[in-house]
Amino acid sequence: MSTTNHDVEKAGMDEAAERRLKDLLRGAVDESLNEEPVPDVLGGVQQKLRLRSGGKFYDDAWSTARHAPVSTYLITSLIMLAVLGISYFVLQPLAGRPEPVRNQPTPVEVIVPAPRSAK
Amino acid sequence: MSAIDDPAEQKFVMLLQAHDERAFNELVCNFGPKVYRLVYRMLGRRAEAEDMTQEVFVQVFKAIGQFRGDSKLSTWIYRVAVNACKNRTKYLSRRHDGAQDVLDLIADHEPLHQAKGVTIGELSRPDQMVEGHEVEVIVRSAIAELEPDFREALVLRDIENLSYEEITEITGLAEGTVKSRIHRARAMLKEIVERALGEKIV
């Protein structure tokens, strides 16, 4: 009888022992690893790429941000709004008073037609 | 034929190949924990694993242009990680620094009151909990004692739960060789653990 690869893998260890070994393995390795926080590697990866690419990649703070910088957008918008408001209140007094509008109608010259002479 | 059927994944790979930084951030966030766990299991050192994980993603960034879609992206990243770990292990063994830190083993285990998943059955008594904790340390030490090639096969199959097909793609070995290595790794592990425990694994 030929020995298949599967037989090779199973040989020498019964199913119960194999299961027991797997339980031991997963118990020993998985449990402690799953409960501990995995370190955040993104910052380190970005830093290495920035250094090794001579600044070609990840050279600015925007590209290294994990999420879109919502707070930056919000603060920039509020600053712009404040600048517009201040400009309006500073410039308004300098604008002067508007020229008063004359609402009197232009005099109309009424031409009365000459009476017709009777023939 | 491409192994990537999902158009969204194809588009993602294209962005990666164009070295899109945001796409790469997403890749690191998605695969970082998985790669870290694999690398930690292969190297057995926490600090080493963190640095190695970063190196793996640097290599992925540099080599993503060579990814042809013949396998899944995750499989390809695993292959990069496994090869990087092999190289690091060789480098460390040349420096006679291959053994896992004993301090890591001590520091990595959970507190005794949380000891679980190590022995079969309930561990309700303190002496059993101590025993469970000892078994955990023994097993982890035994994994570290395995030769890198055998540890790689064992980790990928029995801990990462990958299929034989995926393992052959990652390691580049024939399926028969993979199965043979897994078998031998299990036998070696069993022997080391039994010797340390002084009892048979039934």
Image (cartoon, rainbow, N blue to C red):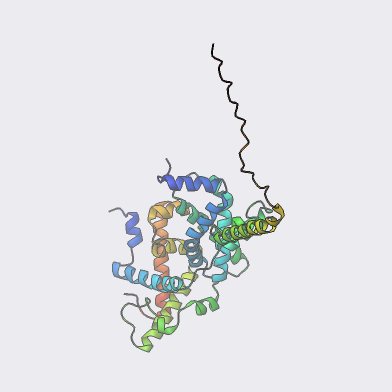
Q: Is residue B84 above or below residue A113?
A: below
- Residue, x 35% and y 55% (percent of image)? A5
Give residue B104's position: percent from left, percent from top.
53, 76
Q: Is residue B87 visible?
A: no
From the viewer's side, name the closer residue of B185 and A70: A70
Give residue B169's position: percent from left, percent from top.
44, 51
- Outermost residue to the bottom: B126
- Residue, x 43% and y 77% (percent of image)? B136
Quadrant including the C terminus of chain B: bottom left
Q: Is residue B66 left or right of residue B135?
A: right
Give residue B60's position: percent from left, percent from top.
55, 53
Q: Is residue B167 above or below residue B94?
A: above
Q: Is residue B81 visible?
A: yes
Give residue A11's position: percent from left, percent from top.
33, 63
Quadrant including the N terminus of chain B: top left
Q: Is residue B69 left or right of residue A80?
A: left
Q: Quadrant of residue B97?
A: bottom right
- Residue, x 50% and y 68% (percent of image)? A38
From the viewer's side, name the closer residue of B34 and B81: B34
From the viewer's side, name the closer residue of B120 and B58: B58
